Structures are given as C-alpha cells and as structure tokens.
Image: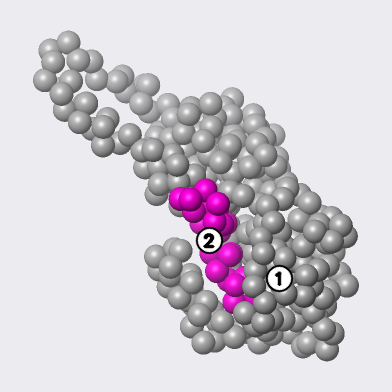
Amino acid sequence: MKRLISFAAAAAALALVLSGCANYAQPSASASSSVAAITDLSGLKGKTLAVQTDTTGQKYAEDHKAEFGYNIKVFDDLPGSVNAVLAGTADAAINDNGVLYDFAKQNPTTKVVKEFNTGEEYGFNVAKSNTGLLDAVNAALTEAKADGTYNTIYNKWFGTDAPKGTAASAPAASGAKPMLIDPTKLTVCTHLAYRPFQFLDTDNTTIIGFDVDLVDVVAKKLGVTQKIVDIDFGQITSGAVFAAKKCDLGAAAITITPQRNTAAPFSEGYFAATQALLVKP
C-alpha cells in the first residue's frame, strides 16, 4: 500500500506544458464523465465491482448484484481490489470505509463517493473455550476508552478524535484464566494488508496499525508482548486458527456477525465501520 507512487504532481506539470501546444486535445466530455458518473451502485450497470473475499463488503455486493446489474470480481486481499480500480481493470471497489478513505488519501486519483450505512462494528475474536482471554480483552478496551488511551490511538491513525459514545462497562467476567499458546506472548492472527488497521511499515518487516496498537494495550494488561501471525482472513473468521492452536486472538478489522460470533466469540466492538464505494473519477 505505501509503496504505491502517486503521479498526480507529474501529471499536473505535464498538463501545463501540453496546454501551450496548439495541437493538444482536451479529453472529451463523454470520456471523462463515464467513470465520474459512478456515485453509487446504481451507476455500475454492466461494469465491474471489485470485492475482497470473505468480507461483509463481498456479501453486500452480492446481495445487490441483481438489483444493479454489475459484475463482481473477487480478490484475495484489499490491495488487489483497490489497485484494480487504480489500474482501471475494475470500475469500483467496495470495502470498509476506514481502509478506503486511507487508500484514497494515499492515492488521490481515487475517491470514496458513497457510504452504505450497514451499522457494522469490529471486534477481536477468540476460541470458544478461552473465556478468560475474552474477559481480559473486554476489560482492557473498557479501561483504554475510559483513560483516554483509546482516543490517543484513534487520533494517531485517523487524525481525529474517536466518536463520542455512551461509555460501556466490560461484561461480567467469567472468572476463568486467560489461556495463551506461549505464556510469554499474546499470539495474534491478522491478515495483511489492511491499512491503517494492520500493514507493513516502510521496512517491509514491522507490522503496524490501529489494531496492532490496540492489541498492544491488551498484551500489556496480560503482562506479555504481542506476536503477530499473518494468515488467511477466512481462517480467522471461521475460528479455524484457534482450533489449530495457531493464535490466541484474531485482530484483523473483523466485522462482528452472528455467524462469526458463533464460530469464535467476539469482544465488545472497538470500531464503528460501514461499507463504502471507491472509484477513479
């Protein structure tokens, strides 16, 4: 994601040079307006909509495909779907608003033109049997929101204060002890790249992001350090990673759904999300 290079400045300079040439032709109105006219799913009839597999964005797209008559192109990860829009091989991409606004900021030739109020929340998930860890996560999130730590992390990654909401107390604790694969570490499964929630820093080695910083708070409460494992998104949401003892906690900007919650219980919500539409005007 961060390795993508914007050519906006170079294009602007070239346009200034060409504008002085008598034979320079401006793009036709029809050519420039065909994509710019896409402001909603209704503008995608006969066009291609990029989605990321195993996401609520994919489900939303499939639920409305017959209504709006677009074609769906499925990608394994976020970069594949949004870069298809950047390259012009897809007319639009649907995904969570936080990641699409961040991509558009890094790539100003793209733009988020629509949000769909789906009322989603992200949560961290654990194995069904690990109620003690779930208690610890909920307690850490409640404390972080109360003492301002959550807002500091939110502001760091989104450049604004966290939305104000009714302060919630952590659910009643089960009294169980957190279970960790490695007692010295909180082993966390994530799925790269999903900037700004989890992605590689400029050294292409260190994993950083909003989710990473928030899970560090949980790890600190447990008196351990965080160890991150990059793995297939569907393996996290299905709970397979816990059955295979690959991690203790799932942290991958995962939208809480009843089906996912049955497979692997979620913490209290830590981020309000919704679906959004990215195009290249």
* Residue 160 disc label: none
Hey, what amino acid is under mark 1?
Answer: Leu
Q: Which residues are magenta?
A: 196-219
Label 1: how many Cα within 10 Å (few below 14, some 14–19, many 20+): many
Q: Secondary structure at mark 1?
A: strand
Give the left or right position of residue 169, taking residue 99 as reference: right
- Find out whether residue 208 is within the magenta segment: yes
Given residues 237 and 1, the one toward you in this image is 1
How far across and how far down the image is residue 119, in percent? 62, 62
The relative height of residue 212 versus residue 53 in the rendered view (above or below) is below
How far across and how far down the image is residue 75, in percent? 65, 36
Label 2: how many Cα within 10 Å (few below 14, some 14–19, many 20+): some
Give the left or right position of residue 126, taking residue 2 as reference: right
Quadrant of the rendering where the C terminus is positioned: top left
The relative height of residue 30 versus residue 35 in the rendered view (above or below) is above
Residue 44: image quadrant is: top right
Q: Secondary structure at mark 2?
A: loop
List the residue tagged with mark 1: 186
How far across and how far down the image is residue 55, in percent? 69, 49
The answer to whether any part of residue 201 appears in the image is: yes
Give the left or right position of residue 65, taking residue 19 as reference: right
List the residue tagged with mark 2: 209
Hey, what amino acid is under mark 2?
Answer: Gly
How far across and how far down the image is residue 79, in percent? 56, 41
The relative height of residue 217 versus residue 208 in the rendered view (above or below) is below
The answer for how far apart the CA atoms under marks 1 and 2 are is: 17 Å
Tell me what residue is drawn at x 58 percent, y 48 percent: 193
Tell me what residue is drawn at x 18 percent, y 20 percent: 18
The relative height of residue 77 versus residue 119 in the rendered view (above or below) is above
